[in-house]
Structure formats: C-alpha cells, structure tokens
Image: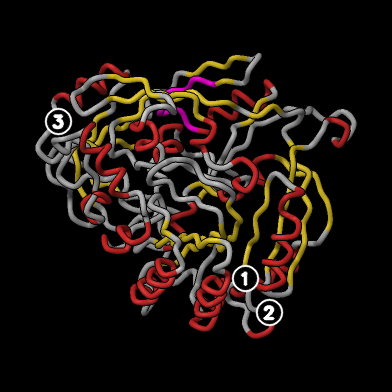
Amino acid sequence: MSSAAPPGTTFLTGWGRTSPTPARLVRPATAEQVAETVRRAPERGVAARGLGRAYGDAAQNAGGLVVDCTALTSWSLDEATGLVTAGAGLSLHDLMAALVPRGWFVPVTPGTRHVTVGGAVAADVHGKNHHVDSSFGAHLRSLTLVTAGGGIRTLTPADDLFWATVGGMGLTGVIVEAVFRCVPIETSRVRVDTERTRDLDHTLETMAATDDRYRYTVAWIDLLARGGRMGRSVLTRGDHAAREELPRGADPLEFAPRALVKAPPWAPDGLLNPLTVRAFNEAWYLKSRPGTSVQGLAPFFHPLDFVDGWNRAYGPRGFVQYQFVVPFGQEATLRRIVARLSAEGVVSFLTVLKRFGPGTPGMLSFPMPGWTLALDIPAGQRGLAGLLRAFDAQVAEAGGRIYLAKDSRMAAGTMAATYPRLAEWRKVRDEADPDGVFRTDLARRLGL
C-alpha cells in the first residue's frame, strides 16, 4: 500500500492484508441512514463492512462504496428467554462483555471476539461447538436487511432470502439487525480436557470417539512434524464450568478480557519461517500437558486476541488463510493434504482441525458434516499458489468446499464446483437485487 488512494477513497484489505483496493467509505449511524446510502448507490455498487476480520476480499469494493456498519451497536436481552436483539455493527467482544456477567454466552463464536454480529450472520460463522450446535445461522430467529431498493425488511427462517443472506457474504443486502438465542452459563470459565496425539490417524480416531462427550472441541496440528509423527496434535475439549468447580471466593461471572501485548507496526518478511515455527510447535506440543483444567472463556476461545494486531507478524506481504471441509468418509483426502503440507515444509503458524456436524439451510453456508482444516500461511512462500490449486481440486473431487470468509485466491470454477446450491442462491439474490447493487471484490473474483 505504498501508493496513495485516489482522492475521497481509502485502501481496504481483509485481515490477511493482501490485495488492497480503494473505495469510498461511509459510516451511517442508523438503519435508515444505511437505507438512504443504498438508494444512492454508485455505479460500482455497495458493500457492507464490519471490523474487517474476513481474511480476504469479502468486505472490499474496488472503486465503489463501502458501508462501515460499526455504528449500529444497539442491543437488548430478554432475560427470561436468552433472546438477544443486536445491531449488525456490535462486536461479539462487546456483546460478551455485556452478556457474560448476566449469565449468558453467545451461541457460536469463531476464533476471535472481534467480529460483528452482521459479519457472523453473513459468513454463518462456526466455532468449536459445530458438532453439537451447528453454526450461527442455526440460532437466528430473524434478521433485518436493507434491500437493493433501499427498503428495510425483516426476514425469518421461513423466507428464502433469509437463507440466501445467512452465509451469503453480504451480497443480498446490508444486514442491520439480528435476533438470536444465547446460551445460559453459570460461570465465565470452561472445564478443559487436554490430550496429545502421536500422529494424524490417532488424532482422527480420538476425535471421532470422544467429540460427542464435549460441547467444544478442537485439535491443533503440528504440520512440520514428519514421518511417524506426521499430524501429531494437541486436542482441547471443553464444557462450560459449573460454580462448584471454581476456587472459593472467585467471581463466577467475571469477564474483562483485553489484549496483553501489541504487535509491532511492522515485521520483516520471513519472521515466520520453518525454523521459528518448528521451534514454536515443539514447545507448544511439550507444554500442552494432558489433563483437566479450568480456563477462562478468552484463553480457551480466543487466544490470538491477546495479541493486538497479530496479523502484522506475517510481514508486509500478509498471509493467506486456507480452510476447507471434506465429508466424513473422505479422510484419505485430508491425509493426502496433510502429508503434502508436511513434505513441502509449508509454514503455518496456526493449523486447526475440527469436526463439523449438520449445517444450516444457508445456500452458501460453508459447514457440512465432515472434517475441516484451517491454515495460516505467510504470503509469498514459493510454490504456494500451485499447491493450493492442487488442494482445491482434491477438495472438490471429495465433495468438499472452501470457506468464503477466509478465501482470498480461489477461482470461480472451484466455487461453482463446490457449492451445489449456488444456482439456487443466484436465483434468490437476482430477485432481491436485479440491478446488482451489492458488489464486492470477492463477488467479482468468483463470478457471483
């Protein structure tokens, strides 16, 4: 981003900090102001944006208008039912800070608290509890959408446009409010069981055998381990802790997480390399002692949030996150991909494996029953583009798909081959937005 943006515009990127593009940015304060902005949509269209935590170009609109929704932060809670009504710009961080002391927790959280409610709906985000609770859309009761004509419409799960919007990456309208049910909790802690596995097969077998005993599960994988240790992992499985599991005198619903360190404003390319990541992986594997412990919500769900701006550690070229899912029964595809990554020595600072349960009816929603693997890879690694294209083909052949909220490089043909309800989604979207008011760089790249 060395060159200046055209006058009146600003460069925007996703969290991966790749492919910046200029757009005019506006920040309306109300749903009515969003609607008025949409009515005056420029030729290059309108895109919605929250906190910019999509990793790729989902919230960019080169040469067009981007609506920053982060001023839409109103919320209310029905204490009797756990139903929350929240503005689309409210972050899960701020929502948790309000809910947890009242004995409630969000139904689904991704690996960061710093996403908005609108973003959670648009990406139909998933978390460590997908095998039990599905994704965010499964807990929605209604959502309010600013449509292409500038109208404001409330949708329910009975509406096709509702399920085109859940997971629809902001391409059906601007989400301005959502109503969803939260989870009652006794404490702000999680009872966590930790286990180390010796290789990938041991990891898969253990997760398949034990996941149904826990609400939350995830495996961290050491991708640089080779030979008989390939795919060795640290499994963490947890459930919300009860009051009697806390030390005497502890505040059971204390919740005030904050970043402990701040990443430097710049980091050199190559800081994360096979040597540094291998050393980290070895230390993390050995540090993760098997056993049971009680942890806070933030350390268990959002460990990276303790480092403010951690994405800058990947250097000025940024990084690519690659996340795919393959159905149960296609474990051989997962093994081939992990083996290739290990053999190539691909540097991934954070590699996590989860088991998905049933998905939502979202037409472009990512999760499906199966195995999902997510990688963070510094951009610019030699041969990376070709390697990921090869993985795309394997995932498509296995009947899997790539996560749109993480994607920054998939081809349109792969999208068409891996999202079987794409034509159905297009039909609903075209009825709602016949003139193509809502546009993003991701939509142009994938031919949506």
Q: Confirm whether the magenta stretch covers residue 12.
A: no
- Alpha carbon separation for disc pair 1 and 3: 47 Å
Give the residue at mark 2: 229
Magenta segment range? 84-91
Considering the numbered disc 2 on the image, is that residue within a helix, a strand or a loop?
Answer: helix
State which tag comes first along the sequence, 1 or 2: 1
Q: Nearer the viewer, residue 393 or 121?
A: 393
Amino acid under disc 3:
Ala
* Residue 276 rendering spot, x and y as whole percentages: 56, 73
Amino acid under disc 2:
Arg
* Residue 56 rendering spot, x and y as whole percentages: 35, 53
Tell whether 86 sits left or right of 356.
Answer: left
At x 37% / y 54%, what residue is drawn? Answer: 419
Are circles 2 and 3 on residues that touch, CB within 8 Å?
Answer: no
At x 40% / y 62%, what residue is drawn? Answer: 320
Give the residue at mark 3: 41
Are circles 1 and 3 on residues that touch, CB within 8 Å?
Answer: no
The image shows residue 405, relative to residue 360, as above or below, that is: below
